[in-house]
Amino acid sequence: MAERLLTLATFNFKDGGWSRRHGDHRNLPLLADVAGQVPAVDVLFLQEGRAFRADGQALRFRAEELLAGSGLRSFLTRSLHGLLDAVVFLRCPPFVPVRHYTPDLPDVYHDQIGLVHANLPGLDRPVRFSSVQWAHWNGNVRLDQALRLTRHAAPGVPAVIAGDFNSLWPDCPAHPPEFEPDWAALPPHKRLHKTLPPGQRPDGRLASDRRALTVLSEAGFVSAGCAAGDITVTVSAAADCGQGARIDHIVLSPWLAHAIVPGSYRVHAGDVADPASDHRMVSVRLDLGQLG
């Protein structure tokens, strides 16, 4: 198969552009600026779509309008944790959406919630996409969320799960000693959010709770960042009292991971991203021609 490139990006857009100071969504136009860091993005995974369901989903359609130059169409999934919904934007065409499983629909199983299935010319099976924002406050909740997704790593399944996992990947090669954040630098009421619970810590020390992403890794999923050997932090310096880590991931099923273009993984920081969120946009390119 000839070279066929596809660009994926994920972005946790803080409060969906909501300005706490002014009490409105005046920061929403920043979405176009941030997305512009990744030219011709084909799939954009967005988290924290605050109030995107309100008023007939007006904000979701406004976000589509802001990204209209990219030809992106949005699919919103109600969050199970509150107001901050997740959105998948697909460039249509070439994608042809065929299913979107939302939790309010009948007969939707636990491992289908949030999935968008879309056909793509040249592939003989639909690709599955899900934008996720896992619980920041509890590793057991994240573990439950991971266990819902393992079947999408089955042989021959093309699936991409991307977003804010609030967890570190377990097995990136050549981790430097400073890769483990100094969780003790956080105030006591925040130290347990991303660390192992008492009784499960090696030597009694605070250590990152990687159980949930270990489940995905052992199921066969591949982190695009780990495949690139890139452990660049995906949050701003102010996040977690300066102890932020790479918690935003683009995760691919084993079958689709063969299409990752070497050297294409990026964490986009700088003046454009900082006003919009405390997270960075992350992107990677796939060459579907490598799938055979």
Image (tube, rainbow, N blue to C red):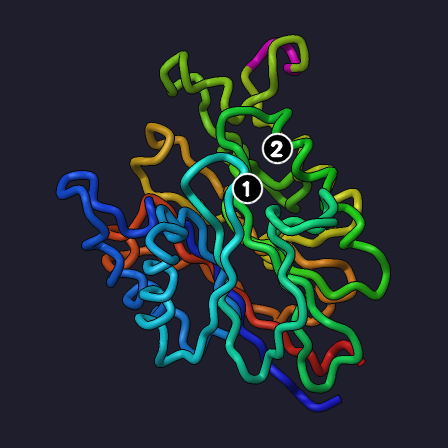
Q: Residues within 10 Å of mark 1 (few under 14, many from 20)?
A: many
Question: Reading the chain from its start, which is encountered first: label 1 or label 2?
Answer: 2
* Type of the residue with mark 2: Arg
- Tell whether 140 sits left or right of 29: right
Nearest the eye: 141 or 188:
141
Residue at horizontal 42 percent and vertical 36 percent from the top: 244
Q: Residues within 10 Å of mark 2 (few under 14, many from 20)?
A: many
User: How many numbered marks appear?
Assistant: 2
- Tell whether 262 sits left or right of 125: left
The quadrant in which the C terminus is found is bottom right
Residue 58 located within the stretch drawn in magenta: no
Residue at horizontal 69 percent and vertical 68 percent from the top: 127
Q: Quadrant of residue 156?
A: bottom right
Q: Residue 256 has which mark?
A: none
Which residue of the protein is positioned furthest toward the right in this rendering? 155
In this figure, which residue is indicated by the disc labeled 1?
165
Nearest the eye: 121 or 238:
121
Q: Position of residue 264 (x, y in %)?
A: 53, 69
